[in-house]
């Protein structure tokens, strides 16, 4: 790939990762509540989930999901149900206990250190894996930057996908650090965490409903 096209691919990837969505919301809410460390772990979980879609797309699994209405629908409803579940956990959290819960319902395990971080990572991972729109995104975006004459297109797709995910990781880590910095300097944020739970919960439910209403791509 010419260097100018590679730079264009990297710039487009960074801009796309800066766009707020369920992933960014998940990272920011954890960072606001529990600090940069929790936000960074959430970012790592999101990134790990992207690896699944990248490898699946490279071997053709994502193409199967895009072509099969049944496969797409099953994954779509699983992802929508998970997002709604996360949102309801936040909406139903008691205000008195909200300060002890992570943004995706990390329960009291947060107080036990590594177990809480593990839950944050896994919830971020599944939030991404169960979203078929992520798989479709990679199928639609990455091939545009693969030259028609490339002999090993799956390898080219894999390398570009890994580059996209690597760049996205730094953007997500930046979201975590920025949110944690804001939380330390804005006392009103710390005093209103239960309202943050309600807003984030409503947004997750909204993302879940939006995903559930997404139509399968046309063959």
Image (cartoon, rainbow, N blue to C red):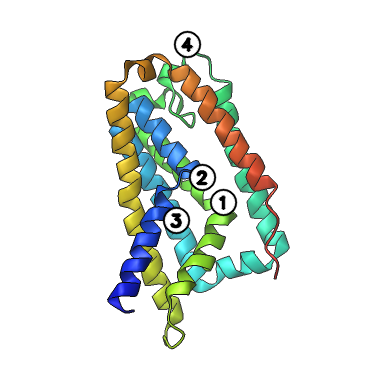
Q: Which residue is mark 1?
A: 131
Q: Quadrant of residue 192?
A: top left
Q: Residues within 10 Å of mark 3 (few under 14, many from 20)?
A: many
Q: Mark 2 or 4 closer to N-term?
A: 4
Q: Are marks 2 and 4 in contact (CB under 8 Å)?
A: no
Left or right, 154 with respect to 79, comes to left
Location of residue 71 with respect to 107 vertically, above or below? below
Q: Which residue is mark 2?
A: 127
Does residue 216 lie above or below 106 as drawn?
below
Q: Nearer the viewer, residue 23 or 48?
A: 23
Task: Decide: is 31 above or below 162.
Answer: above
Circle count? 4
Q: How far separated are the C-alphas under marks 2 and 4?
A: 26 Å
Mark with earlier residue (3, 1): 3
Residue at the spot of label 3: 50
**Residue at figure coordinates x 40%, y 35% from the top left:** 28
Which of the 4 quarters of the picture holds residue 145? bottom left
10 Å neighbourhood of mark 1: few (<14), some, or many (≥20)? many
Where is mark 4, residue-wise? Answer: 96
As measured in the structure, the alpha-carbon distance from the residue carrying label 3 to the one carrying label 4 is: 35 Å
Residue at 55% of width from left, 72% of height from top?
A: 60
Distance CA(mark 1)–CA(mark 4): 32 Å
| Residue nearest the viewer, comparing 184 with 64 | 184
Q: Are marks 2 and 1 in contact (CB under 8 Å)?
A: yes
């Amino acid at each position: 790939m010419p260097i100018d096209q590679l730079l264009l691919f990297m710039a487009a990837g960074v801009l796309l990762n800066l766009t707020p969505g369920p992933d960014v919301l998940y990272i920011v809410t954890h960072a606001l509540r529990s600090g940069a460390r929790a936000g960074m772990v959430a970012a790592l979980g999101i990134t790990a989930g992207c690896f699944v879609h990248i490898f699946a797309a490279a071997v053709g699994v994502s193409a199967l999901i895009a072509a099969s209405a049944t496969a797409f629908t099953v994954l779509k409803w699983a992802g929508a149900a998970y997002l709604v579940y996360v949102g309801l956990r936040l909406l139903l959290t008691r205000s008195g206990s909200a300060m002890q819960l992570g943004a995706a319902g990390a329960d009291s395990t947060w107080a036990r250190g590594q177990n809480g971080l593990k839950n944050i990572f896994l919830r971020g991972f599944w939030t991404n894996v169960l979203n078929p729109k992520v798989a479709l995104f990679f199928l639609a975006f990455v091939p545009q930057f693969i030259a028609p004459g490339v002999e090993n297109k799956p390898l080219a797709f894999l390398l570009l996908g890994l580059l996209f995910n690597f760049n996205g990781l730094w953007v997500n880590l930046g979201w975590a650090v920025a949110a944690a910095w804001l939380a330390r300097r804005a006392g009103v944020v710390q005093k209103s965490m239960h309202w943050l739970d309600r807003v984030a919960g409503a947004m997750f439910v909204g993302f879940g409903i939006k995903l559930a209403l997404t139509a399968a791509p046309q063959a």
